[in-house]
Image: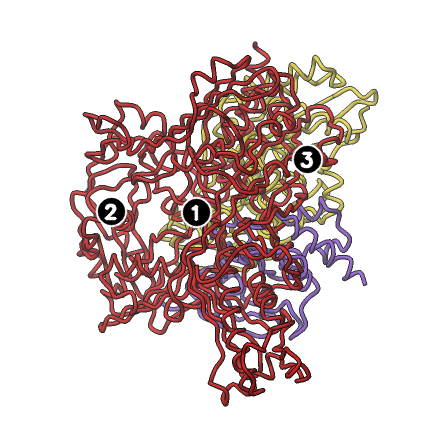
Chain colours: A purple, B yellow, C red
Amino acid sequence: MSGIAVSTTINGDEVEYLCQADETLLDVLRDRLEMTGTKEGCGTGDCGACSVMVDGRLVCSCLVLGAEVQGSTIETIEGMADGADLHPLQQKFIEHAALQCGVCTPGFLIAAKDLLERNPNPTEEEIRFGLAGNLCRCTGYDKIVRAVQDAAQEMKG
Amino acid sequence: MQYERPETLKDAVGLLSNSKGKAFVLAGGSDLLVRMRGEYIDPDVIVDIKNVKGLDQVAKTAKGFSIGAAVPCAELGENKALKKAWPGVVEAANLIGSKQIQGRCTISGNLCNASPAADSVPALVAAGAKAVIAGPGRKRRVAVEKIVTAPGKTCLEKGELIEAIELGKQAARSGDAYLRFIPRTEMDIAVASAGVNLTLDNKGVVKSARVALGAVAPTVVLVKDAARAIIGTKLEEEALDKMALACAKACNPIDDKRGTIEFREKVSGVLAQRAAKIAYARAGGK
Amino acid sequence: MGFDAAFEKKKKLNSVGTRPLRPDGVEKVTGKARYGADFNMPGQLVGRILRSPHAHAKIKKIDTTKAEKLKGVKAVITAKDLPDLTDGNSDLYDVLDNCMAREKALYDGHAVAAVAAIDAATARKALKLIKVDYKILPHVTDVDEAADAKAPLVREGVFTTGVDPKPAKPSNITNRSQYGHGDVEGGMAEADFIVGRTFKTEQTHQGYIEPHACVASVNSDGNAELWVCTQGHFVYRQNCADLLGMDASKLRVTSSEIGGGFGGKTHVWSEPVALALSRKAGRPVKLVMSREEVFRASGPTSATSIDVRIGAKKDGTVTAAEATLRYTCGPYPGMWAELGAMTAFAPYDFANVKTVGYEVLVNRPKVAAYRAPSAPMAAFAVESAVDELAGKIGMDPVKFRIKNAAKEGSRASYGPVYGPIGIGPTLEAAKKHPHMKAPLGKNQGRGMACGFWFNFGGQTCSNINIGEDGTVNLAVGTVDVGGSRASLSLVAAEELGVPYEQIKAVIGDTGTLGHNDMTDGSRGTFSSSLATISAARNAISIMKERAAKMWDIPVEHVEWENGHAVAKGKKYGNLPKLSVKDIAAKAGRTGGPIAGHSELVADGAGVSFATHICDIEVDPQTGATKVLRYTVIQDAGKAVHPTYVEGQYQGGAAQGIGWALNEEYIYGKDGRLQNPGFLDYRIPVCSDLPMIDTQILEIPNPNHPYGVRGVGETSIVPPLAAIANAVSNAVDARMTHIPMSPPRILKALETEAAE
């Protein structure tokens, strides 16, 4: 079995890899590229822990084949901070204790960033429905919603 | 397993027609990959149609809209003209899964997955949508309600694929709406659902209507008696009650992990009533 | 215990009670933190487990030859590769049998064989080549059906213990337990009103987002490593060593960051299998469960069936209360009903009370702890009956509970006499809370309920090491599940008198610390804070000695104040004080490295109580529910890091809400689990919940210097009942079956209308 050669841009860097036809983008990120910040919670698109951006769209990387992203631009949690400077959402998640175990956090941050880029001034309800594809079992979502609200304020400057 | 990404429809049809083993079309993949992972299917060939020219577009045509088979549902919500003409269809498409799923999933895929609970299908059926089918033979147009023949089964022949879903121009004084029942507020499969599309006369009386129910029978059902119950009315309580009764009668549901027979019979009527009221208001009825 | 842990009433706290940023925050928001599946070893293989598709079946034969011959397969194991070394220890034998079925598959998902291969695709292929010859046996999954004398027997030769005389016939009931005091029948005779009902709750899962994952590596010389997400790596080490016949000292277990546990990661499932595969293959093996495997084959909580009867006088005095509790255990004995029997009436001071628990075997996965295990179901039954009884009497449910609440000196229904406790204060706070007076709309109902959890202490060991630059390493052995490194750093900072930022807390691996019990029973912060206080005080006494040496004065004249050694007395009072940094800088010349150790059994974990209030709206046409408002009031003893205490309150409430409304294991007639995924096992999503308000009360635990009590679990105890009471009030029909899914609510509404 020979692999499929794929060229992509991940977090601004050009990346090439070989993958099998049935490997998901999540498998490629985690197992081939050692980018383990993107998590697998279910593998069936039901928990959002593997959220990444593909060509500007929020997706579950477990429901994208590694071979599909030829020529695509991908953003993952590893590219969210600007070097040593955390994104305001990352900072607010820490300040508000919006994470307990933290395993859902990368997915939430990717989804929340997409949410705020599309809607810089969301209501609580818009935040709750906008993040409904990301499961968190520790926090009851309260502090996550507050962190997103606070980050939205800060990003408006 | 072989992965192919043709760039023309002809090549896509060729790959599907000439494949030796089990060939599957990959559009969004939000159903296909789940079925692969669960080992329900073991494809020999996957034909990714996202690079096929034209399939990634929502086109405004002389007749209405043509939604390419590879257009993710999220994009439908961003198309103002489509949203204005067919708010019910767009609402339904934007209820599938989560934001993440909507970034990939397509209404053509939702249809071809052939689940009785598919969210976009009752809305498409109510809207009178047609599927454009490409294949080795002649291109054909089939009413959406005719595509699914049984749970997990469609009328597509080997080598065929849906190229686009066509929606007509919405007539004057018309409105559509879709509602589903799920135990949570998001991220769920419909336990029962209803799509309603209706047109009013200039007095606000329902002139024509289509009512479709999901998740209450092996396939989505177009309930003509439910439409008849509200045609010629202004959705008075009596008409709505008759409509709910017709819905319950049209149900042929099962007891399963998502709901009971009696629950589905009751709730499908409730949803149809509520969707009809929304569609009525959208059509300008008061 | 090594030191006097009594509450120090006069102690002024500077660090404890503040809200600094957690030390592992940046790692976790940048994706750098390594969880169970985020670690690899050189030459690592992929492990996969073959699971029974049958609820109950005899394993006649397993043929692995084809799988072994597949290219890329490096090891295939069955129960034969995990020989029985348990030496009559039946609990350990059950763990072994659960890890790999020996004679019978006892539930859908029970492991029967495993492979290690060069990649996932090969491993999957190999599993398909293993042929298992099953003889299907009759199964039983429902708690009441299993408790029936005519039920198929899940295990052979089970004779109920705790009954006299010993039963003549075997059954699925492994044990009967009983608690209480007084004369229940006499008490009932004095009652003006009696409420008696039967309640049912379905099985739920902890639903942690991170599936079980480990990497195991066993060398031919007996040395081994295990990287694993666990709530207790020391316990895992001992279990694995016992099951595989290894020296515990040679098995080094490192706990990864853990993506949630809630009790579900207190038990080994795949870890011994990964070690056995690695031992056979001679290479490291990574074994990660799929979500489906987590649901089918880890440890959910019990399904239950509970009878409650409570009697009271017109003035609201409860005269007698009793409950009979039947809890499923899965196919192996447990003490789940017993915990339910102990906690059921714990918030109250009843003169006559009796609870009886029956442990019931069923063909479902082995039950594991789930946050205050067994208490939420008992509280659902009892608090529902309490509410109904208050209604019958015509008394406000809060006042009724206040009248009957336990207080200091009350004898608990499960035996002990309470010290200072928080049930009364949480109820008084609820009474005064604005939530109680907020207006309700149409189809809306308000409910409230109380909950109790014991909290545990147990074996704990911590180290404090002070570097040459005066910064501090704190090594603890209790896994940090939700922010305990922050709270324990606060404790170390408090004791040493140094800034929080000067402390770096780590979770030590099994090779670097003495045994620590699990992070369970809400013991993490309680027990490790005691060990940390004790270790810090030991370090301080060493630093005082060093300062004395530096000053060349007798140590009796040295005291520790605000992070400094201070010389006391007329003679030495003018010596300039020495900071930790000053002392550490000279350590090489005053006796070597400075460290403080502590090994202790943390006794006296203070019990904790909570009262919850919630408002629910019900759609009368569909049975759909909406949680409009939710308030948690709970005693923390002392909140070390209040933000994370709030987080525990909110998280427990959210899990309870999910349990109350939608979560349940659904089994088909074939005994197979029908919803092993997050799509149909419906944990709450963000849009299902409102903000969850919290109120922290601090009634000091007399057995902790700062008054700390466990806080993690109690918050899941009241929600089932609070929501049931709210829904019952909204629809004017008593809800007796959890979860209150829309079909169940609609049915209750229709039944009520028909009556």
Task: Sort mark 2 into few (<14), some (14-19) or many (20+) by Cα contacts within 10 Å.
Answer: many
**Residue under mark 2: which chain is it in?**
C
Q: Chain of mark 3?
A: C
Q: Nearer the viewer, mark 2 or mark 1?
A: 2
Q: Which residue is mark 3?
A: C628
Q: Is residue C361 above or below residue B71?
A: above
Q: Nearer the viewer, residue A28 or C642?
A: C642
- Give the residue type at disc 2: Ala
Whether labels 2 and 1 share one chain: no
Q: Are labels 3 and 2 on one chain?
A: yes
- Residue C187: where, in percent of width, then height? 47, 18
Say whether mark 1 and mark 3 are on the same chain.
no
Q: Nearer the viewer, mark 3 or mark 1?
A: 3
Residue at the disc numbered 1: B35
* Mark 1: few/some/many CA within 10 Å (<14, 14-19, 20+): some
Q: Chain of mark 1?
A: B
